[in-house]
């Protein structure tokens, strides 16, 4: 596999998606062959699974079902989009990947690390990103941003109780600690320009020096 695989992680409200949109054109100047994608989704059937998972009407989806749906979407997305791009030598940037399941389902939903790690491994055949950028933000600040920015557009996971959001952040902090060589933590409470600059620098420092 000759390509480079980068994932972007962080709690809801960290600004991941906005940051990625800003960083992409900057990166395209350095590496024209970039594939930007997201989880759950990225390919048609996985986007359909995404609709099912995030639909606020689907109140009967329990934690285990949720984990399995994310794992199914992950497997499909990897097979159809990520692996072919990496084999073709491209730079792939994914908005969320395996660590989201650890933080949200493992910690947030209290399913524990073991089943999540096993399913991640099963879904990906053990593939991990070369670099994971973790956008860290205090839970209260993140919840405040969610309330301000998308009060009328909250998905099923945004609407979870504050307690779950706290656990998700704890989960992220634990994974980052357990694999320090894979992660770069970025302070997402800074003004957007600074978060964008730090994210770009983390990528260029590692791969474009
Ligand atoms: P995201 O696309 O970041 O949401 P938004 O577009 O609203 O910013 O992610 C969708 C939600 O799915 C988010 O709340 C995190 C959650 N998620 C999990 O719980 N587990 C997972 O494995 C993944 C990939 C996402």
Image: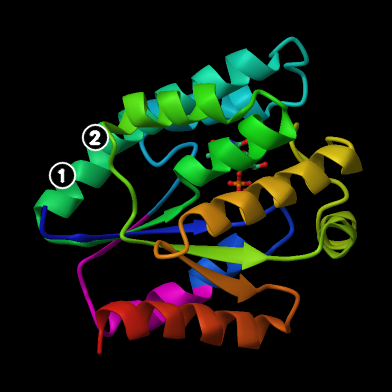
The image quadrant of residue 55 is top right
Q: Which mark is residue 84?
A: 1
Q: As drawn, is 105 to the left or to the right of 57?
A: left
**Residue 96: percent from the left, percent from the top?**
50, 49
* Number of numbered tags placed on the structure image: 2
Extreme residue in the top direction: 60
Q: Does mark 2's beta carbon lie closer than 8 Å to ligand 1?
A: no
Q: Which mark is residue 80?
A: 2
- Answer above or below: position of 175 versus 156: below
Q: As drawn, is 160 to the left or to the right of 67?
A: right
Kindly identify the residue that appears in the image at 39 percent across and 83 percent down.
26
Classify mark 2: residues with Cα within 10 Å, few (<14), some (14-19) or many (20+): few
Q: Nearer the viewer, residue 52 or 2?
A: 2
Extreme residue in the front direction: 178
Classify mark 1: residues with Cα within 10 Å, few (<14), some (14-19) or many (20+): some
Kindly identify the residue that appears in the image at 86 percent across and 55 percent down.
143
Question: Range of the magenta residues?
Answer: 22-36
**Residue 123: percent from the left, percent from the top?**
34, 27
């Amino acid at each position: 596999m000759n390509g480079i695989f980068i994932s972007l992680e962080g709690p809801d409200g960290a600004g991941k998606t906005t940051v990625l949109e800003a960083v992409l054109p900057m990166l395209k100047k350095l590496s024209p062959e970039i594939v930007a994608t997201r989880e759950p989704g990225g390919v048609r059937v996985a986007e359909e699974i995404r609709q099912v998972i995030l639909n606020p009407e689907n109140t009967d989806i329990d934690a285990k079902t949720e984990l399995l749906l994310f794992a199914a979407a992950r497997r499909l997305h990897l097979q159809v989009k990520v692996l072919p791009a990496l084999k073709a030598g491209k730079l792939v940037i994914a908005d969320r990947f395996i660590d989201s399941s650890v933080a949200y389902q493992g910690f947030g939903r209290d399913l524990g690390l073991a089943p999540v790690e096993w399913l991640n491994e099963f879904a990906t055949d053990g593939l991990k990103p070369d670099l994971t950028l973790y956008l860290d933000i205090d839970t209260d600040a993140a919840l405040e941003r969610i309330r301000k920015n998308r009060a009328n557009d909250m998905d099923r996971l945004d609407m979870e109780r504050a307690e779950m959001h706290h656990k998700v952040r704890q989960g992220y902090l634990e994974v980052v600690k357990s694999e320090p060589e894979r992660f770069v933590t970025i302070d997402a409470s800074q003004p957007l320009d600074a978060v964008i600059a730090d994210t770009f620098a983390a990528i260029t420092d590692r791969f474009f020096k």
